[in-house]
Amino acid sequence: MNKQDSVNLLHPSMLQIQYLMELEKVGKKRGSVTMIADICGVSHGPVSRFFKECMERGYLTEKYEFTTEGTHALLIYKKLLRDVKLYLKAMNIPDKEIPEKMRQLIENVDYNLLRTMIRNGRKTAEQDKSHEETQDSQYSRESNAYFIEKILEKGKFQVGIAVHQMSRNSETRISMAHQGFEHLALIRNNTRGSWLELKIREVHGRSRIDGTRMWGHISSLKYEKQGQLYEAVIKDGHLRIPLSACHFFRGRMGNVKGTVHITVACNIGNAHMPESTAVLTFWM
């Protein structure tokens, strides 16, 4: 999938992609919507409404036949499912966690950014494997001060970010806080200082009680530096984390990623969610 493919592409849920894949198998026949709903474990309504949206987008005809655009879109969705699964396997995510992580990534991450994550993930996996085989100390973890002073270029540039939950059993999953930031951040490295700048965005969710749609935003973020927690100042929808609080890794081919432990709180609807710990990862 290239950038052109994803322009104006409908961004369905995992379940909705399954509707299209089942329609491809079933073909146009009487009762196909009911049949697909039964296979997917849902009622007739959600399938019918989604297919109507596909008709309006030009993916399906009124007879539930795929148009040229619809066939092309379905190919992109299939490739995306395959690539995301391979990406998660390459990241050594346990098999039992992969379906949920696939859903989180495909439904919550912009396709262009997801494509970049997959590409960088492949590079990182290849570099890590090469590093383990050669045991070349030249590419071991650099100290933060050395990295910022000697390796990081001066200026301003974009980096991709992801926020993962921390759990006692070492399982990882995309954190709800991941939705609270734009998925492209800025690294600023100049004479005045060096920091990671995040842009806050609205968080969308549904009540676990009655399914009501709710909106909110990140209300606070603390980052860990040398065992101490420091609160980041939120100003005009942005916040900064000093690069001196981050841990950097450099691969054999020069690919760099950084991590920082954070504690975040979020206001959703009228509720103030408790603080949760997470790991923020960014890559260059």
Image (cartoon, rainbow, N blue to C red):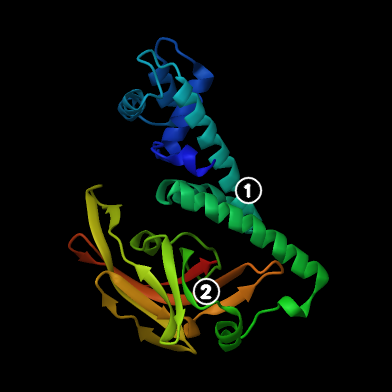
Q: Which residue is mark 1?
A: 86
Is residue 138 shown left or right of residue 269?
A: right
User: In the structure shown, which secondary structural element does the residue marked by tag 1 occupy?
Assistant: helix
What is the three-letter code of the residue carrying label 1? Leu
Residue drawn at the location 42% of the way across and 46% of the way down = 107
User: In the structure shown, which secondary structural element does the residue marked by tag 2 occupy?
Assistant: strand
Residue drawn at the location 56% of the way across and 50% of the way down = 98
Q: Position of residue 271 (x, y in %)?
A: 21, 64
Of 241 and 2, nearer the camera is: 2
Of 40 and 77, nearer the camera is: 77
Which mark identifies residue 259?
Answer: 2
Comes first in the chain, label 2 or label 1: 1
Is residue 17 shown left or right of residue 124?
A: left
Instruction: Assign the N terminus to one quadrant of the image.
Output: top right
Q: Position of residue 167 (x, y in %)?
A: 49, 69
Instruction: Please tell me whether residue 37 is drawn above or below residue 173 in the rendered image.
Output: above
